[in-house]
């Protein structure tokens, strides 16, 4: 039908505009982060093997001594267990600076509680206080996993906390990069009413098992033994 009727004008080609650019950007960022994780992009997070066990007359908190930054060993004498009061201690895995901040804050608040109320803070109250501190820092979190243990009028008790302050009571616990291996040894060997020597031997076996497979853990163990007599600190090298 050439020559009949007006010719229609040729429309210019309209460029395609993505309808949801933010979604595409998020997907690209997610893919990039996934590639970084596969390539070890998050390997800078420090490792540790930190253990807490309730025995017949108290609690033992322990952690190995190695401080790492990715695959670099920064120190072979780091301390990850801290005395809070004469009956309460804290053991951590994560950034050493954040551990020290938490330990100092806990010790100060526990002393203020004792002066204000007229009696020593309980283990449950100390753990809840630490949970509140961590939750209040949720937008700029302290990079730590924490075990709080001690002895009070209710007996020996142990609590595990994550970065955001989730609070879980338990009889034994492990945090850090060596958790999977150490927990297997603890679950196999733990029993109610253990003596202090049995608990210490079990903790040593569990940490040594983790050290043999976890490059971020090693160089010895620090113990914090909490009983009615008070807090005793011990250390061993290997």
Image (cartoon, rainbow, N blue to C red):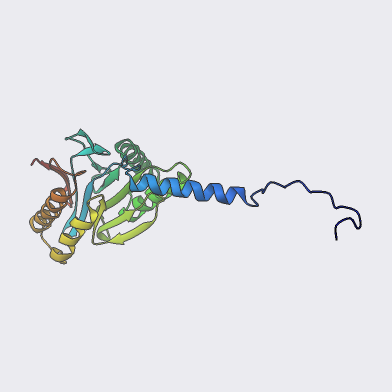
**Quarter of the N terminus within the rendering:** bottom right
Q: Is residue 96 left or right of residue 62?
A: right
**Residue pushed farthest right?**
5
- Determine if residue 174 is in view: yes
Vertical position of residue 119 compared to residue 95: above or below: below
- Residue 201 spot, x, y in % from top left: 9, 55
Q: Nearer the viewer, residue 41 or 148?
A: 41
**Residue pushed farthest top?**
74
**Quarter of the C terminus within the rendering:** top left
Give the quadrant of residue 189: bottom left
- Determine if residue 229 is in view: no
Q: Is residue 214 left or right of residue 107?
A: left
At 13% from the left and 49% from the top, the residue drawn is 212
Give the quadrant of residue 191: bottom left
- Residue 64 spot, x, y in % from top left: 17, 44
- Residue 130 spot, x, y in % from top left: 37, 48
- Residue 149 spot, x, y in % from top left: 26, 53
Q: Nearer the viewer, residue 37 or 212?
A: 37
Q: Is residue 43 left or right of residue 26?
A: left
Q: How many marks?
A: 0
Q: Nearer the viewer, residue 222 or 39?
A: 39
**Residue pushed farthest front?**
2
């Amino acid at each position: 039908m050439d020559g009949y009727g007006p010719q229609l004008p040729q429309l210019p080609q309209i460029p395609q505009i993505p309808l949801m650019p933010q979604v595409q950007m998020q997907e690209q960022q997610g893919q990039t982060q996934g590639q970084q994780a596969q390539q070890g992009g998050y390997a800078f997070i420090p490792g540790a093997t930190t253990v807490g066990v309730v025995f017949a007359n108290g609690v033992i908190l322990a952690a190995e001594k190695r401080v790492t930054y990715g695959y670099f060993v920064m120190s072979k004498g780091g301390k990850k267990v801290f005395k809070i009061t004469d009956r309460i201690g804290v053991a951590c895995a994560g950034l050493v600076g954040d551990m020290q901040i938490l330990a100092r804050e806990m010790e100060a608040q526990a002393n203020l509680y004792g002066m204000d109320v007229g009696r020593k803070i309980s283990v449950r109250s100390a753990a809840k206080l630490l949970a509140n501190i961590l939750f209040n820092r949720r937008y700029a979190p302290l990079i730590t996993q924490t075990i709080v243990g001690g002895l009070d009028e209710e007996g020996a008790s142990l609590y595990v906390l994550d970065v955001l302050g989730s609070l879980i009571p338990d009889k034994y616990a492990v945090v850090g990069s060596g958790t999977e291996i150490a927990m297997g040894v603890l679950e196999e060997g733990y029993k109610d009413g253990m003596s202090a020597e049995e608990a210490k031997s079990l903790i040593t076996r569990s940490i040594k098992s983790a050290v043999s497979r976890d490059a971020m853990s090693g160089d010895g163990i620090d113990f914090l033994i909490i009983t009615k007599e008070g807090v005793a600190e011990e250390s061993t090298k290997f």
